[in-house]
Amino acid sequence: MSTFPLRLPDDLKERAAAQAAEVGVSLNQYIALAVATRVGAQAEAERYFAARRARATRGRAKEILAKAGTRPPRPDDLLE
């Protein structure tokens, strides 16, 4: 295990410390869990999109878009 000096804005540190206290863990454990959660989510997203990329067929998106038609959007479908 390694140590890492971390600079946080005071208000963020206070909020994190309060949340850590609510769940009964140290601020260090709380921050480590938050980082681990984010790293895991990022790794899962990378795996998901790599699998999608592996299944993709080049040019298929253009075929799908070509089927969408050429009619203009309905009046209730326009952005302001």
Image (cartoon, grey):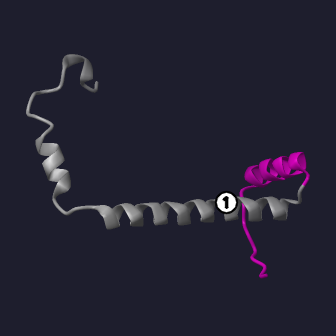
Left or right? Give the position of 50 relative to 4.
Answer: left
Left or right? Give the position of 58 relative to 41.
Answer: left
Q: Which residues are magenta?
A: 1-24
What residue is pinned by disc 1? 37
Of all residues, the one furthest to the top in this rendering is: 76
Quadrant where the image shows the N terminus: bottom right
Place of residue 77 in the rendered image (x, y in percent of width and height, measured from the top left) = 25, 23
What residue is shown at x 11% (from left), y 44% (from top)? Answer: 66
- Residue type at mark 1 is Thr
Please, is residue 70 above or below residue 50 in the view? above
Numbered disc total? 1
Residue 56 is inside the magenta segment: no
Of all residues, the one furthest to the bottom in this rendering is: 2
Place of residue 34 in the rendered image (x, y in percent of width and height, measured from the top left) = 71, 59
What residue is shown at x 73% (from left), y 69% (from top)? Answer: 6
Mark 1 lies on a secondary structure that is helix
- The residue closer to the viewer here, 45 or 26, is 45
What residue is shown at x 19% (from left), y 63% (from top)? Answer: 58
Quadrant where the image shows the C terminus: top left
Query: Quarter-wise, where is residue 36 in the image?
Result: bottom right
